[in-house]
Image (cartoon, rainbow, N blue to C red):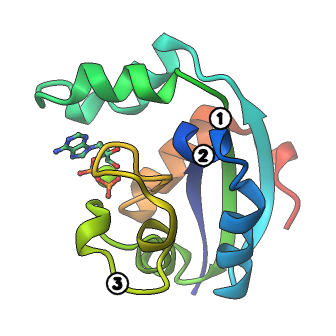
Amino acid sequence: MTERTFSIIKPDATRRNLTGKVNAVIEDAGLRIVAQRRIRMSDAQAKKFYEVHAERPFYGELVEFMTSAPVVVQVLEGENAVAKYREVMGATNPAQAADGTIRKLYAESVGENSVHGSDSLENAKLEIAQFFTEADIVG
Ligand code: ADP
Ligand code: MG
């Protein structure tokens, strides 16, 4: 089934000029970038986006990191895009990520791990709606 998922190229990657290299991995995997915008995430946006992790010990550090430099927010489209992008990203901790995945290639640590990808179709819809309107998405 053709799906859309939400992606963020995180500050550790934009800082190192890795946007193009990350996008190459995404496109080589057959996912289409149907919307993309470089933004500086506000504190409120980052807090809301990671609300589900509010009780975790790393929440404050995560919000600080996500607002520390620009990010690139994206909508990706393709066959089983949600699961496929999770595969392409690799495990949260780059030490556990499979060869060829974005996190294995580029992530610096479990926190500064280069990319975000939605974990379910339902969350993908909510996350996309936080940053894009339907008119922004050109499939
Ligand atoms: P994923 O991004 O793979 O879905 P999680 O949803 O578990 O991972 O966590 C969200 C984000 O929080 C991670 O991508 C990472 O940036 C950060 N994070 C997760 N676990 C840790 C940790 N143990 N220490 C620091 N940051 C973490
Ligand atoms: Mg997650």
Q: Quadrant of the N terminus?
A: bottom right
Q: Amino acid at mark 2?
A: Ile
Above or below: residue 47 compared with residue 100:
above
Q: Classify residue 7 as left or right of residue 18.
A: left
Return the residue nearer the eye: 109 or 60: 109
Q: Are marks 1 and 2 in contact (CB under 8 Å)?
A: yes
Residue pointed to by mark 2: 128
- Residue 50 x %, y %: 35, 32
Above or below: residue 16 compared with residue 6:
above
Above or below: residue 57 compared with residue 43:
below
For the residues labelled 1 and 3, the Cα–Cα distance comes to 29 Å
Residue at coordinates 53% horizontally, 51% vertically from top-left?
125
**In which image quadrant can residue 79 be found?**
bottom right
Q: Amino acid at mark 3?
A: Ala
N-terminal of the two: label 1 or label 3?
3
**In which image quadrant can residue 30 be found?**
bottom right
Q: Amino acid at mark 1?
A: Phe
Check mark 3 vs ligand 1: CB closer than 8 Å? yes or no: no
- Residue 11 x %, y %: 56, 37
Looking at the rendered structure, the secondary structure element under dot 3 is loop
For the residues labelled 2 and 3, the Cα–Cα distance comes to 27 Å
Q: Which mark is residue 131?
A: 1
